[in-house]
């Protein structure tokens, strides 16, 4: 908020620079009709920061152009905030009859444009580039969009080029489904070949034992949660992994109170593109998709995600990681974690989560939008694929018993290797 007794110009400048807002030009001299239209367009395009621009227009420019400009600018603000052409209410902003016709004309223009213009700032997936434009169309079969730029030209590009915030915007506006129905959007510029042994639509009556273990043969789970095969089920076209409040008899020392679940691939894979459509469980028992393998010579791990579906701190936090525990050249454990805050809660719906892993880079994406990437410096070992739920006493905290049983549901896993 702007302090009433401080220098407004300085505050706006500092606030704008701090938040990296678009720098609108300061008008000098008389405010012409052309410049008014420029102000109007800028404010509509940069809607997200309208309040600060309202202050900027009124305080920085108002003294130069007089009370008429004050009224017109406030009129614009009211029209936009209501998002309708509420001319009868906003015309009261005109303070005298001489300015009434100007105010009426401006209010009509303002209402028409705010109703019809849907331009916004679009951001690239890596966050380095922005541009403004109006969405013209979206093609779910190809995952491509057409945006009309400020100069009138149209640009076509893939939704994977967009930031996660833009993907969320498109969902809110109803331009795309929460998840493209059954359609995988593979990285462009490469030829991809399916990996059948790591692809499953889970349409049978039980887990495919030729592809999967219903537990992890090399690990019993993270204490105190024990991996129980009884918590793994295929039902209604989905794989379900459930966490429960349960103490099984004769469990190994350290395991008690909770049982969880794991599914591990029988095949190994080195490099590829992997896409899972799933809904994490709404519990502090985790929902995870990851790769690892431990041998006497080498032990590495790539975590596509580890999600806690509850609590304000965690329910929209996307936790990614890559571990090196040992290699022929590395003897000490290190990791390269990443986090991304989603504009939604993961446990509320199904979303697409994907990993592109090759000899040069590792990339994480959510709903087709890149959220994290890093150079591949050590992850060249063939790995097993896993889905699981674990208890994390020292990270998420132990699950609230009232939230269990809870289920991590997977609609499909699809895998490809580069030709």
Image: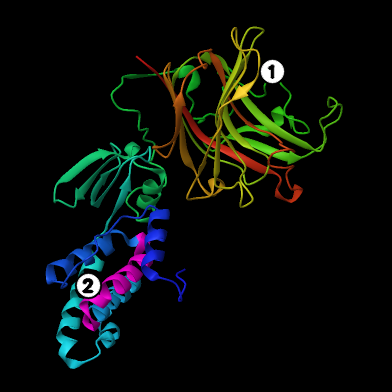
Q: Please, what secondary structure does the residue beneath circle 1 have?
A: loop
Query: Residue 399 lies in magenta, yes or no?
Result: no
User: What residue is drawn where x is 32% and y is 51%?
Assistant: 175
User: Magenta: predominant secondary structure element?
Assistant: helix
For label 1, count other residues whose C-alpha is less than 10 Å away and answer few (under 14), some (14-19) or many (20+).
few
Q: Position of residue 122 (x, y in %)?
A: 31, 48
User: What residue is drawn where x is 59% and y is 18%?
Assistant: 300
User: What residue is drawn where x is 33% and y is 62%?
Assistant: 47
Which residue position is annotated with label 1? 217
User: What residue is drawn where x is 66% and y is 17%?
Assistant: 332
Front residue of 45/198: it is: 45
Q: Which mark is residue 309?
A: none
Quadrant of res 98: bottom left
Residue 85 appears anywhere in the view: no
Q: Please, what secondary structure does the residue beneath circle 2 have?
A: helix
Query: Residue 58 lies in magenta, yes or no?
Result: yes
Q: Which residues are magenta?
A: 48-68
Which residue position is annotated with label 2? 110
Position of 334 compared to 117: left or right?
A: right
Q: Position of residue 280 (x, y in %)?
A: 57, 41
Relative vertical location of residue 19 with respect to residue 300 in this rendering, above or below: below
Position of 295 compared to 198: left or right?
A: right
Tag count: 2
For label 2, count other residues whose C-alpha is less than 10 Å away and answer few (under 14), some (14-19) or many (20+).
many
Front residue of 138/161: it is: 161
- Closest to the camera, between mark 1 and mark 2, is 2
């Amino acid at each position: 908020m702007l302090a009433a007794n401080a220098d407004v110009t300085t505050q706006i400048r500092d606030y704008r620079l701090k938040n990296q807002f678009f720098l609108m030009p300061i008008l000098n001299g008389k405010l012409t009709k052309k410049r008014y239209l420029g102000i109007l367009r800028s404010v509509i395009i940069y809607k997200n920061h309208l309040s600060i621009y309202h202050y900027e227009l009124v305080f920085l420019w108002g003294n130069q152009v007089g009370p008429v400009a004050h009224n017109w600018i406030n009129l614009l603000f009211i029209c936009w905030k209501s998002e309708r052409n509420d001319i009868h209410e906003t015309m009261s902003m005109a303070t005298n009859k001489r300015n009434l016709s100007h105010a009426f004309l401006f209010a009509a223009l303002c209402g028409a444009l705010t109703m019809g213009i849907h331009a916004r700032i679009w951001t690239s997936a890596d966050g380095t580039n922005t541009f403004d434009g109006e969405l013209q169309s979206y093609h779910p079969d190809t995952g491509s969009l057409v945006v009309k730029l400020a100069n009138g030209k149209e640009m076509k590009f893939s939704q994977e080029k967009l930031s996660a915030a833009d993907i969320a915007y498109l969902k809110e506006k109803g331009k795309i489904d929460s998840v493209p129905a059954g359609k995988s959007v593979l990285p462009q510029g490469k030829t991809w070949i399916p990996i059948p042994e790591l692809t499953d639509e889970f349409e049978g009556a039980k887990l495919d034992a030729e592809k999967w273990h219903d537990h992890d043969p090399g690990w019993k789970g993270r204490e105190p949660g024990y991996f129980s095969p009884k918590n793994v089920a295929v039902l209604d076209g989905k794989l379900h992994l459930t966490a429960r409040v349960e103490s099984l008899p004769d469990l190994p020392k350290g395991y008690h109170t909770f049982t969880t679940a794991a599914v591990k691939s029988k095949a190994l894979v080195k490099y590829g593109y992997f896409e899972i459509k799933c809904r994490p469980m709404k519990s502090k028992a985790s929902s995870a998709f990851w790769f690892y393998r431990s041998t006497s010579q080498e032990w590495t791990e790539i975590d596509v995600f580890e999600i806690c579906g509850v609590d304000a701190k965690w329910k929209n936090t996307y936790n990614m990681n890559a571990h090196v525990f040992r290699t022929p050249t590395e003897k000490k454990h290190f990791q390269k974690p990443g986090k991304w805050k989603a504009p939604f809660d993961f446990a509320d719906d199904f979303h697409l989560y994907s990993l592109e892993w090759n000899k040069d880079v590792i990339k994480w994406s959510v709903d087709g939008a890149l959220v994290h990437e890093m150079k591949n410096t050590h992850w060249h070992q063939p790995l097993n694929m896993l889905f699981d739920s674990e208890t994390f006493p020292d990270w998420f905290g132990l699950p609230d018993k009232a939230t269990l049983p809870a289920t991590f549901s997977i609609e499909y896993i699809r895998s490809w290797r580069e030709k």
